[in-house]
């Protein structure tokens, strides 16, 4: 994955990608930087915006979905068109103004304290408050200043039924927004559509995979315990029969005397 820094030579004739060194407790999410070759030292500047975890999850799900369909059905034209078919218009966008509640997938909190792995949650966005001066009809995915008020929901895997979680409302920002999901209401029963259920579970599996990968990498970084090994004689002296083999109790002086 693109987790590191891409360097260009000043004349643009070559480039080098250096993977980020994993450290215990660091975020499992990818962080890509493309440094401006015209700036060096303290003036170095990344040319690409940061991809927040919510956006990485959306991209990961879409790429994984396309790959699985191509693998299952081959790479003929019809299958490629099916794998790359567009999603419903606006499903991946967050409007800056809503007249009625909007159901969506968001990321928040941590699965385990200190892991940096945020959990995918089903939520109903009740209110959106754009940052001062923002006039566009949509909010940027990197926006950390605008706010949205949400109610978290729990999803029943088999039936697709949803129920509101008995916790206070939560204030998030557009950077926590993944995508919209379609929800229907029949009396007091809420359900999300099949595509929403697929996205919900797919993205939770991606998060679980990141956590497992982090655990494996951390376990590999743990220093191995070394067993105490008795010293051996140099190769040139191994055939000398009157020398005691690796006897720590014998001092060098006594060895010389015996020789």
Image (cartoon, rainbow, N blue to C red):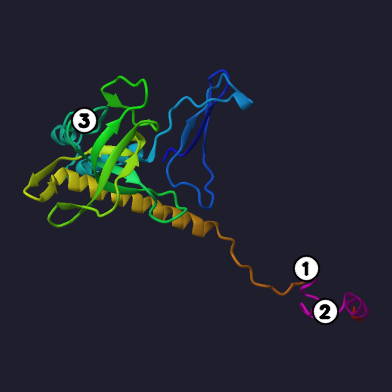
Percent from the top left, x then y, of residue 154? 22, 53
| Prevailing secondary structure class for the magenta stretch in the rendered image | loop
Q: CA distance from mark 3 to mark 2?
A: 89 Å
User: Dot 3: few (<14), some (14–19), or many (≥20) neighbours within 10 Å?
Assistant: some
**Does the magenta-highlighted stretch encompass residue 253?**
yes
Q: CA distance from mark 3 to mark 1?
A: 81 Å
**Does the magenta-highlighted stretch encompass residue 222?**
no
Which residues fall within the magenta stretch? 237-257
Q: Nearer the viewer, residue 77 or 154?
A: 154
Mark 3 or 2, nearer chain start: 3
Q: Nearer the viewer, residue 236 or 213?
A: 213
- From this view, report whether residue 195 is shown above or below residue 96: below
Disc marking residue 136? none
- From this view, report whether residue 148 is shown above or below residue 71: above
Q: Nearer the viewer, residue 26 or 79?
A: 26
| SS type, badge 2 | loop
Q: Which residue is mark 1?
A: 234
- Residue farthest to the left, as pictured: 187
Percent from the top left, x then y, of residue 109? 38, 49
Left-right relation of 152 to 110 = left
Q: Nearer the viewer, mark 3 or mark 2?
A: 3
Q: Which residue is mark 3?
A: 98
Mark 3 or 1, nearer chain start: 3
Q: CA distance from mark 1 to mark 2?
A: 12 Å
Q: Are marks 3 and 2 in contact (CB under 8 Å)?
A: no
Q: Which residue is mark 2?
A: 243
């Amino acid at each position: 994955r693109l987790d590191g820094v891409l360097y260009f030579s000043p004349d643009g004739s070559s480039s080098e990608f250096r993977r980020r060194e994993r450290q215990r407790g660091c975020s499992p999410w990818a962080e890509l930087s493309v440094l401006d070759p015209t700036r060096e030292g303290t003036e170095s500047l990344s040319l690409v915006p940061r991809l927040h975890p919510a956006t990485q999850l959306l991209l990961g799900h879409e790429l994984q979905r396309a790959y699985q369909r191509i693998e299952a059905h081959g790479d003929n034209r019809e299958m490629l068109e099916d794998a790359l078919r567009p999603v419903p218009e606006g499903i991946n966008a967050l409007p800056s103004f809503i007249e009625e509640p909007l159901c969506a997938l968001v990321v928040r909190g941590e699965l385990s304290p200190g892991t940096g792995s945020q959990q995918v949650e089903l939520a109903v966005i009740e209110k959106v408050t754009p940052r001062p001066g923002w006039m566009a009809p949509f909010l940027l995915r990197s926006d950390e200043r605008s706010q949205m008020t949400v109610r978290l929901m729990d999803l029943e895997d088999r039936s697709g039924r949803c129920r509101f979680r008995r916790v206070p409302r939560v204030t998030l920002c557009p950077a926590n927004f993944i995508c919209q999901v379609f929800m229907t209401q029949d009396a007091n029963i809420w359900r999300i559509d099949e595509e929403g259920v697929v996205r919900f579970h797919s993205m939770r599996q991606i998060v679980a995979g990141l956590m497992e990968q982090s655990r494996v990498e951390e376990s590999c970084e743990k220093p191995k315990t070394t067993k105490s090994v008795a010293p051996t004689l140099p190769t040139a002296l191994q055939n000398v029969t009157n020398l005691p083999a690796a006897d720590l109790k014998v001092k060098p002086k006594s060895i010389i005397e015996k020789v």
